[in-house]
Every structure is written in structure tokens, then in C-alpha cells.
Amino acid sequence: MTPTGTPTRQAATGALTGLALGDALGFPTEFSSVPAILAKCGPWREMKLPDPAFVTDDTQMALAFARALRASTEGGSLDPERLAKETGDAYVSWYRDPENNRAPGNTCLSACAVLEHLDRPREPWQRAARMESKGCGANMRVAPIGLVPGLSQEQRAGAAQQQSALTHGHPTALAASDLTAHAVRLLADGADPAGLVGRLRSYAWENRTRYHHDWLGGLWEQAGDATPGEFIARGWDDCLAALDRLRDALSTPSPETDPCLTTGDGWIAEEALATALQCFLLFPGEPVTALRRAACTRGDSDSIACLAGAFAGAHLGPGVWPAAWAERIEYRTELLSFGALWDA
């Protein structure tokens, strides 16, 4: 796509570092009310990164998807069939990893249990999809596809939706993952944050009835909709409604108010996207403040902060993160390895 400004230097390193930092900052505050967080952590603008800086399943699954992308692009272009196999294998490996002990979501666990026992390729991966789930577990891990260079818009959108559908098959989970990856790519390409919501709304309208058959196969048939277009439109409509709430919230910004009150608690995909965007867009030039605002919320704080960190890092690069924080984040070596690969 054509950049709208100067592309961010080392956008991948910045986004992946920000993703993990937000995840770690929000890990201790998830499931807590704002008063409880303030009592525990003090003023939200002064929140400190935990020591040790452990991450959750959000970063673990983002790295699993990153490994699948690296394997799928070695020696050729990104292919739907190969990516589905590599991503399924990577998610099952995460499912069986002893380090998968960070309160992972039930949808991811149940879908991975099915994926593990599928007789692939005779049994299609679509059988693992939890069609009723639009939880945020799909878009919290999708940022890597927005950072891989040289992809077409079709490849990026198809891959974003496919990685969601392996676990979360609801059309809103697919659309929110697509929008999240698109936002990361726009910011890495130099898009002005002030126009980001408008561009995302335009993208949603343009793709509202577009079903990526090559990447999703017959997934839509499991949902009971009359056509593929009707299936995916339900997801885009949910996301458009969330973007409208975000636009309204930003029209009268209130940085000291819990953003969950206006754009949702983030347990479901479209709310996680909208609330993370609100945190980022309230402080587009203050990425650490954006992470702290995201972590001090009543909702799914680690996922909201994880996404906010990916947006801020894609926009500003890795130099904006405090060295004392970045140097001790869990999985730092692997995060930097993927950053270097895609920044090259």
C-alpha cells in the first residue's frame, strides 16, 4: 500500500516490544476494578512495570503466530494452506507448553484441543473454530501480520482472519483481527494518528461483504448465514459500531476517565480494539502514558494494553520505550529477533 507519511523506523521492533510491555503492565491489573488498581499501584500515571516483567498468553500467542509466519514465508510467498498448517501447529505447541500457565482463554484452549487431534489434511482446520466466540483472544495476537513486509492487502487481511478462525470463528473476531492488523500496518507506514479512525471506518465499509474464500474456505457454512457476504457483514457491522463509539469518545476526550466506560471492557474483540485505540489516540505522542492508561482499566487490562503498545510502537518505533523496561521484558530475545527480521 502507499504510505501516507514517513514510514516508522524499526516499526516491527517497536510494535513487538510495546505489545509485550503493555501485556506485562496489564497482567497484575486484569480482573481488578480501577479503585483496586489505584490502591495497589498508586496514581495511574506513575504505574511501574512489574519486576519480573512476565507477560501473559497474549504475547505468547503473538509469538506463536510470528513463528508460523516466519516458517510460512521461508522460500516463497505467503500461502493460505501452508499458513493454516503452520499456525495450527504453532498454536498446538503453545497449548502444550508448560509455560502456558498465564490464565489463557477458554476458547483458545478448547479450539487447540480440537486442532491437536484433527487428522489433517483429511479433516479441515475449520472444524476447530469456535463459531460462537468473538473473544479478544484472536486480535490480541494478530499484530505480527501487520509487520511482515512485502505482503499484499489481500494476503494481510486473509491471514489475519484465518489466524482468528483457527480458534475464534465468529465473524466479529475475524473482522476485528483484520482491522487490528490494518491499523498496525497503517501506523508503520506513517499514517497520521489523527486520521486513523476515519481510515479504519473506510476500510471496514469497503470490506463489509468481502469473504476471503482462499483463506477461510467453508468456514461461513458453520454459522447458518445465507451467504458468505452476510456472514462476514455481521462482524464488520459490530466493528463499525465500536468505531463509532470510539469516534464519539475521542470527540470529547477524558483522559482521567476509565476508557472502558465509553468503548467497552475489552473482553470481546471489537471492544478490545476500540478501547486499545482510545488509549493510544488519547496519548499518541506519550506511549508509556498510553500503556498506563490501558493497564488502569476495569476490563481486560493486559489485552487492551498489549494492543495499545503495538499501535504506539508501530507509530513511534522502539526508541520510545524506556530502556530499563525493555531490557527486562520476558521473551525479549525472541521479540527482538522477529523485529530485526521484519525491520530489515
Image (cartoon, rainbow, N blue to C red):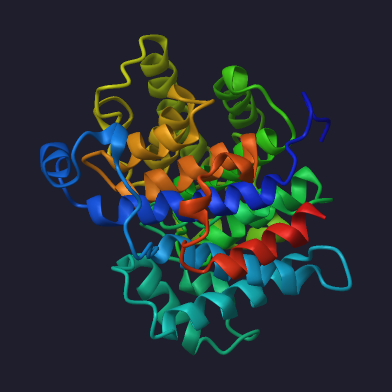
Q: Is residue 135 above or below residue 299?
A: below
Residue 312 screen position, x and y as percent = 55, 37
Identify the image quadrant of residue 206.
top right
Closer to us: 34 or 104: 34
For the C terminus, give its image quadrant.
Answer: bottom right
Q: Is residue 243 above or below residue 65?
A: above
- What residue is rendered at 55% in x and 65% in y? 332
Q: Is residue 333 above or below residue 289?
A: below
Q: Is 198 displayed left or right of 78 in the figure?
A: left
Closer to us: 327 or 119: 327
**Farthest residue toward the top?**
252
Closer to us: 306 or 129: 306
Q: Is 300 displayed left or right of 251 in the figure?
A: left
Residue 221 screen position, x and y as percent = 53, 59
- What residue is rendered at 63% in x and 55% in y? 144
Look at the image and tell me whether residue 251 can be seen.
Answer: yes
Residue 162 screen position, x and y as percent = 60, 60
